[in-house]
């Protein structure tokens, strides 16, 4: 029997499989994993002060590398704390290997205080789920988990690791499993879509998943140009490659009426890695589906398929031009004066650095940003895929770990920021190059609108009060400083421009509290 | 058909059933609930910036009132964020009515971004779980939920409320359901325990659940005095009434070796509302059960029964004295100089105010407190029942809402505090009389010990680094100020005494960052 314990086999197998970062918030049942870090120096452990930060960071890391990070969580409550951002990662189809420590198998019957139903929790977000039966299995289980996470289109693979499988010896490192390449969309299926698109009836393309990267977008833009159809991107892409020199693609608006206007008159909607458009919430007397009446929906392959290749074949079949129309470089003038949302958009468009990774959880404050930033130097835009707020600061943290040479710009709502604010500490600890802009409007602004949207009876002072964040005022600069992140506050466009430039120029994390007018 | 909508019927039914506080973090699917607050002014809405704060506050409220508060959560991710503190509440058997808004029923098939398996999540913590089928059912469902939560020994009742059941009219307010009183323990069962206790063999009593309040403790102390047996309390009681004029009872130590020493030689362990003692975690080559070999375990009733009455009957049967031995009033001298854990214990013993509610999530920093605070004026001690950290600040928040005339003292570890730090904002918003002491030892100190306890191989710099919170330093005073809570920092016993006195004397919340020596 080997003298390798389960935890050591786990980490070595993960590293051999290309998983060399672990975002973690460990507890007693994970102590052997922690100890094993000293034996496998290739694994980088990144400490997070809350599990939702760890899972969100893994999401950001996976979106930027297309490789899973691992997440180390402590028992059921630790997993529970990480679920909301795993929900977002599931929606983003991010590859993640989640390792949840459990009590030793023989200990579970005693119902000690932390005992709970880990399997039920894990099942809600995991595309692959296994509980290791013994130390001898841990290596093989870990290799299977990595392969499952990496298999197109990416999923959350959760391995539950009872403490005794972790500390017992007799474990073996497992070799990486082969990961199948994404399947090709059958030629006749591509031809059928080509026939639809060349039918002469009004068509539109809606891309999502893997088709939101440059290669897929270029092919999609060629197709769209060939047939004169509009090209849309899903409302909340995991990672949209955009900016100067890349195809321009509009995200379908979240607001149902605006989405309806974009799709009005379309007879054929061709989905490429995107879901058929649906209202984010149900509203009284409003349809759930945003597909116009009389519009047929077609799908080019599935999210698991090689969509960029299918789009390239499609481009040939529809006789598309060899080159896609690309976004010209264009920056707005720097705004001055009041910090309106419009001014903020122009400011970001004017200053966004080359290669930026923009993490957008600005909710109501960032809806006007796509226009003025469209011609900024090429950058990536990461969005709130699953609607579970508290995602921005953690995803930015993980993206910065993934891409240490690229500037990360995190756009945060004040309400959302408070969910996982301790991500700032991890950014300071790891000296990550993240510039966070918190848009302080002192309210759950989106809900003020939603109160009206759902047709709730005219709201009075008590209901409005429950959406109000200004009493007392949240001082994000003070909180950030308390976690080691240098912070400033901006009340004018000039101040914001100055502070943003300085934050980008200095290494390490920074936070700017962007105080919106009237708040 | 009535023109009352489901949300209005829900809130009115809750209020009629005695549930008149709602800790909430709402979203779109809960907007009708929010709007209905203007129609039912008896319901107090308390806004929390994170769901784990809301659920923890409901736990604290329920422990202090023995009545449920309601919690309003937004869809699966909102519930997920609240699960860890619902886990603690489940272990505390706190009555809680959890209302989780869901998408409208017809909308779920569209798999919009926030769709997830709410029922699976809720099932892991709920003693009662129902999904309202229509607006007409909501009132009755809410009345059933309140009754379920209140039925002894208290549980989490979760009502999933699809948005359309909330906004549709035709709902009806339901009258409160009768709640059955706790069952009496059968006389022969009490007699059997009396026979054991008077057998002459070494016995010990271990009380938990409802037997940790004064009435049960007095009877238990009379029994223990009559037979000369030690009286212990479960390690993590939901609410232990203690201090001068109440029976003295030692909590069974968490450390297995110390617990074993207490129970060595005991032949009969009588459980009264407590579980048989079990190791908090499994450790290699250590037993899970802490019941000594050769010791028989007996149970006086179940946690659902009227345990104080059973203990009083038992006292009669064993010929107990009419009066229990009570703790004499005694305060230590105020310490001076270095802020050792021993000094902190004496300081709290010297200054703890009459009627204090102590919320203890101090982890390694508060283990030495029971002794020096035993003779302080009568107070309640609320502990981390389920081991899921991030409970202290929220529970203190809810306890302060429940008992506005009593001072709340929250003892927090620095690692634990960071889980749900935004509770401070709710304390400021509601101007709650909570004094929080954060014990800054700059580490997950408990895990440094656990790394050794689990027999993990000699730890190196990389594993130790992952338990270290000092890089960068967490400035709790800055963070608290940023959320509107006045805060100070204490480095000596004199400073702490001075700051603690002032915090107690002033209304509203305060935080003291207690910097432990060497950190």
Image (cartoon, coloured by chain):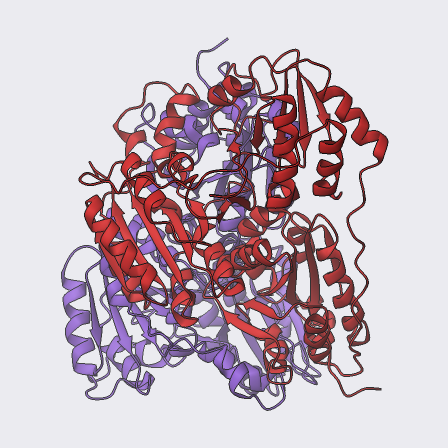
Chain colours: A purple, B red
Q: Residue at position x 38%, y 57% from top?
A: B421
Q: Residue at position x 24%, y 83% from top?
A: A332
Residue A128 falls left or right of residue B158: left
Pinpoint residue B213: horizontal percent, then vertical percent. Answer: 60, 45
Image quarter in which the C terminus of chain B is found: top left
Is the residue B158 above or below the residue B256 in the image? Answer: below
Is the residue A504 above or below the residue B412 in the image? Answer: below
Is the residue A379 above or below the residue A262 in the image? Answer: above
Pinpoint residue A226: horizontal percent, then vertical percent. Answer: 49, 76
Closer-to-camera residue (B44/B372): B372
Tell me where residue B106 sits by quadrant. bottom right
Tell me where residue A105 sits by quadrant. top right
Q: Do we see residue B236 in this rendering?
A: yes
Residue that sits furthest to the top in the current view: A1
Q: Do we see residue A320 in this rendering?
A: no
Closer-to-camera residue (B8/B361): B361
Residue A28 falls left or right of residue B33: left
Is the residue B462 above or below the residue B106 in the image? Answer: above
Pinpoint residue A367: horizontal percent, then vertical percent. Answer: 41, 79
Pinpoint residue B147: horizontal percent, then vertical percent. Answer: 76, 60
Residue that sits furthest to the bottom in the current view: A458
Image quarter in which the N terminus of chain B is found: bottom right
Q: Residue at position x 80%, y 82% from top?
A: B170
């Amino acid at each position: 029997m080997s003298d390798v314990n389960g935890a050591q086999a786990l980490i070595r197998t993960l590293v051999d499989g290309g998983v060399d970062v672990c975002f973690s918030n460990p507890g007693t049942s994970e102590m052997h994993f922690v100890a094993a870090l000293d034996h496998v120096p290739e694994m980088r452990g990144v400490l997070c002060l809350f599990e939702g930060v760890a899972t969100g960071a893994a999401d950001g890391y996976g979106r930027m590398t297309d490789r899973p990070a691992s997440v180390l969580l402590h028992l059921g409550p630790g997993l529970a704390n990480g679920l909301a951002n795993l929900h977002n990662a599931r929606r983003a189809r991010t590859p993640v290997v989640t390792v949840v420590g459990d009590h030793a198998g023989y200990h579970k019957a005693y119902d000690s205080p932390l005992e709970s139903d880990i399997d039920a929790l894990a099942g809600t977000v995991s595309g692959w789920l296994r509980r290791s039966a013994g130390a001898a299995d841990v290596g093989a289980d870990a290799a299977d988990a990595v392969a499952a996470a990496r298999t197109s289109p990416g999923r959350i693979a959760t391995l539950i690791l009872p403490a005794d499988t972790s500390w017992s010896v007799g474990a073996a490192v497992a070799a990486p499993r082969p990961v199948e390449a994404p399947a090709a969309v059958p030629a006749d299926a591509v031809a059928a879509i080509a026939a639809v698109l060349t039918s002469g009836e009004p068509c539109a393309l809606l891309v999502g998943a893997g088709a939101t990267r440059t290669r897929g977008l270029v092919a999609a833009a060629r197709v769209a140009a060939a047939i004169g159809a509009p090209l849309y991107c899903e409302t909340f892409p995991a990672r949209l490659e955009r900016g100067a020199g890349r195809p321009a693609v509009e995200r379908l608006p979240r607001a149902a009426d605006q989405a309806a206007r974009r799709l009005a008159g379309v007879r054929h909607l061709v989905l490429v890695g995107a879901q058929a458009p649906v209202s984010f919430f149900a509203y009284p007397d409003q349809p759930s589906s945003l597909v116009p009446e009389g519009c047929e929906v077609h799908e080019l392959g599935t999210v698991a398929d090689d969509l960029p290749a299918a789009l390239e074949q499609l481009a040939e079949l529809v006789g598309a031009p060899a080159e896609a129309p690309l976004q010209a470089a264009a920056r707005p003038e720097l705004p001055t004066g009041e910090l309106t949302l419009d001014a903020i958009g122009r400011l970001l468009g004017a200053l966004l650095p080359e290669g930026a990774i923009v993490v957008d959880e600005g909710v109501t404050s960032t809806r006007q940003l796509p226009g003025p930033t469209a011609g900024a130097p090429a950058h990536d835009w990461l969005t709130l895929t699953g609607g579970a707020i508290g995602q921005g600061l953690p995803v930015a943290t993980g993206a910065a770990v993934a891409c240490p040479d690229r500037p990360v710009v995190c756009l945060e709502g004040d309400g959302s920021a408070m969910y996982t604010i301790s991500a700032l500490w991890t950014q300071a600890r790891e000296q990550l190059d993240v510039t966070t802009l918190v848009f302080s409007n002192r309210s759950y602004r989106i809900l003020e609108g939603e109160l009206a949207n759902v047709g709730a009876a005219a709201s009075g002072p008590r209901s409005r009060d429950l959406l109000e964040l200004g009493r007392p005022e949240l001082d994000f600069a003070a909180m950030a400083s308390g976690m080691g992140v240098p912070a400033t506050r901006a009340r004018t466009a000039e101040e914001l421009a100055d502070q943003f430039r300085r934050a980008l120029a200095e290494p390490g994390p920074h936070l700017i509290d962007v105080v919106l007018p009237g708040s």
